[in-house]
Each structure stands twice: as C-alpha cells, then as structure tokens.
Image (cartoon, helix red, strand yellow):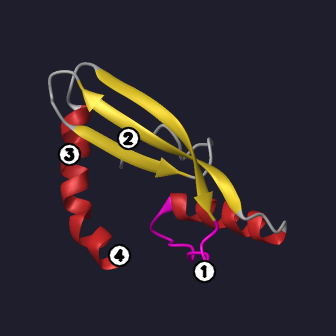
Amino acid sequence: MMQAALLIAPLMKYFADGVREDTVIGTDDTGVTLLMPKDIPPIDPDDSRSRRIHEVLTAAREKGEPSVGAKMWAYRGVYVRLNVFDFTVSPGTDAKQLVA
C-alpha cells in the first residue's frame, strides 16, 4: 500500500491543486473510527502529519484503546469538478488542509 500511495502522490497533488484553483470550494468532515493498526507507522521526517499520527496512535496504544476517532475530509470545487478526500487522526493543525 505504501508503494501505491507513493506512486499516486503526484496525481493526488495535481487534483488538490486543481480544486485549490477554484473560486469556491465546498468541504465537509465526517467522523470515523480508526481501528488500532497492528504496527504504529514510524515518523517520516519529511511529513509533518506523520508525527501527529504517531503521537495519537501511541497514546491510544498506551491506554489500551482499541480505536481512535478520526476525520475523513471531502473537498469539491464548484467549477473545477473534482472531489478530493483527506484523512486525519486529530482535529489539530493537520486537519482542514487540502491535501498538500
């Protein structure tokens, strides 16, 4: 899955850039439950969001939590007819960012 994510990253950036060019962007966030993964992903020094993901999942694991609250964000341009989705594990500074 990581290789697929790396492969499509330029396409996702292209779509997100397209939505950002629109004059009006609609957005919505939906709360979802993220089941605790078997392994907590390591921190990627090139990805500021990975540190927050690691913090949230580590804290949940230490508390014995089976899951954490997360958000699925949807963005859609009015004139640029693209839908872009983003996923966050916290409502902090990593949320509400159209895929960077």
Residue occupied by mark 3: 15
Image disc number at residue 1: 4
Residue density around tag 4, few if under 14, some if 14–19, many if 20 or more, within 10 Å? few
Question: Could you give the CA–CA distance between mark 4 and mark 3, rounded to whole angstroms?
Answer: 20 Å
Q: Secondary structure at mark 3?
A: helix
Q: Earlier in the sequence, mark 3 or mark 1?
A: 3
Marks 3,1: beta carbons within 8 A: no
Residue density around tag 2, few if under 14, some if 14–19, many if 20 or more, within 10 Å? some
In what quadrant of the picture does the N terminus appear? Answer: bottom left
Question: Could you give the CA–CA distance between mark 3 and mark 2, rounded to whole angstroms?
Answer: 10 Å
Q: What secondary structure do most residues of the magenta stretch adopt? A: loop
Q: Tag 2: residue type? A: Leu
Q: Nearer the viewer, mark 3 or mark 1?
A: 1
Residue 19, x across and y down, in percent: 23, 34
Residue occupied by mark 1: 39
Q: Tag 4: residue type? A: Met
Q: Earlier in the sequence, mark 4 or mark 2?
A: 4
Question: Could you give the CA–CA distance between mark 4 and mark 2, rounded to whole angstroms?
Answer: 21 Å
Instruction: Identify which residue, 22 or 84, lies in the foreground.
Output: 84
Residue 93, x across and y down, in percent: 58, 43
Residue 45 inside the magenta-drawn segment: yes
Q: Which residues are magenta?
A: 36-48
Residue 68 inside the magenta-drawn segment: no
Q: Residue at x 18, y 57 (%)?
A: 11
Marks 4,2: beta carbons within 8 A: no
Question: Could you give the CA–CA distance between mark 1 and mark 4, rounded to whole angstroms?
Answer: 14 Å
Q: Nearer the viewer, mark 4 or mark 2?
A: 4
Q: Earlier in the sequence, mark 4 or mark 3?
A: 4
Residue occupied by mark 2: 98
